[in-house]
Image: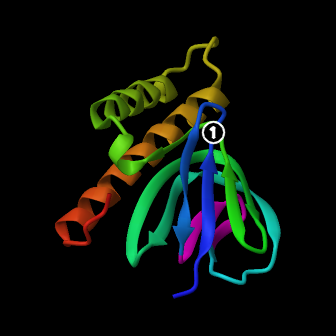
């Protein structure tokens, strides 16, 4: 099967750098799937999960915004924060979601609503990545 290279890069590290058959991401204007031979493009990413197929198996990562650049032989995701589903601390993600949810219900003047909403989105994306990873494992897909 035809492949192309996928790199997921944050300021701290290269999260992923391997050949894949397909990448599905949520851009700010909707979901898109990249296959080998896709036309070059650059788009901004939303705070959500990124799915990719490598060696016939689907894998999940939480990508908390960033840029997706599709080239001739390589697709690059540049994000401030990106984690593979098995790297996410589920308990910490639940705690972060609870804190953000509590802050959104408060009406204090010193709360920055956009920061609170972003924190809630990030925690939700992390938890979604963990849950999708669990579902794939239970289905016997052998995710890593």
* Residue beneath the point at 58% across and 36% down: 13
* Residue beneath the point at 60% across and 51% down: 8
Q: Quadrant of residue 116?
A: top right
Q: Quadrant of residue 82?
A: top right
Q: Is residue 26 left or right of residue 137?
A: right
- Please tell me which residue lies in front, 132 or 115: 132
Q: Is residue 81 left or right of residue 129?
A: right
Q: What x and y, as percent, mark residue 106?
A: 49, 21
In magenta stretch: residue 70: no
Figure check: 111 above or below 60: above
In magenta stretch: residue 30: yes
Q: Secondary structure at mark 1?
A: loop
Figure check: 33 above or below 104: below
Where's the C terminus, which quadrant?
Answer: bottom left
* Residue beneath the point at 37% across and 39% down: 88
Q: Which residue is mark 1?
A: 10
Around disc 1, counting alpha carbons within 10 Å, would you say few (fewer than 14), some (14 to 19), or many (20 or more)?
A: some
Q: What x and y, as percent, mark residue 61?
A: 47, 53
Q: What x and y, as percent, mark residue 77?
A: 66, 54
Q: What x and y, as percent, mark residue 78?
A: 69, 47
Q: Is residue 21 left or right of residue 75?
A: left
- Please tell me which residue lies in front, 127 or 120: 127
Total tally of numbered discs in the picture: 1
Q: What residue occupies the far top of the structure in this picture?
A: 110
Image: magenta residue range: 21-32
């Amino acid at each position: 099967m035809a492949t192309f290279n996928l790199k997921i890069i944050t300021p701290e590290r290269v999260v992923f750098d391997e050949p894949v058959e397909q990448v599905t991401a949520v851009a700010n204007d909707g979901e898109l799937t990249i296959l080998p031979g896709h036309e070059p493009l650059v788009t901004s990413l939303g705070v959500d999960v990124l799915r990719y197929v490598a060696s016939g198996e689907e894998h999940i990562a939480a990508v908390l915004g960033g840029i997706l650049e599709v080239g001739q032989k390589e697709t690059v995701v540049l994000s401030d924060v990106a984690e593979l589903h098995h790297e996410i601390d589920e308990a910490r993600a639940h705690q972060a979601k609870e804190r953000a949810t509590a802050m959104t219900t408060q009406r204090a003047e010193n709360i920055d609503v956009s920061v609170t909403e972003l924190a809630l989105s990030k925690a939700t994306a992390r938890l979604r990545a963990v849950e999708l990873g669990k579902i794939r494992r239970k289905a016997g897909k052998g995710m890593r």
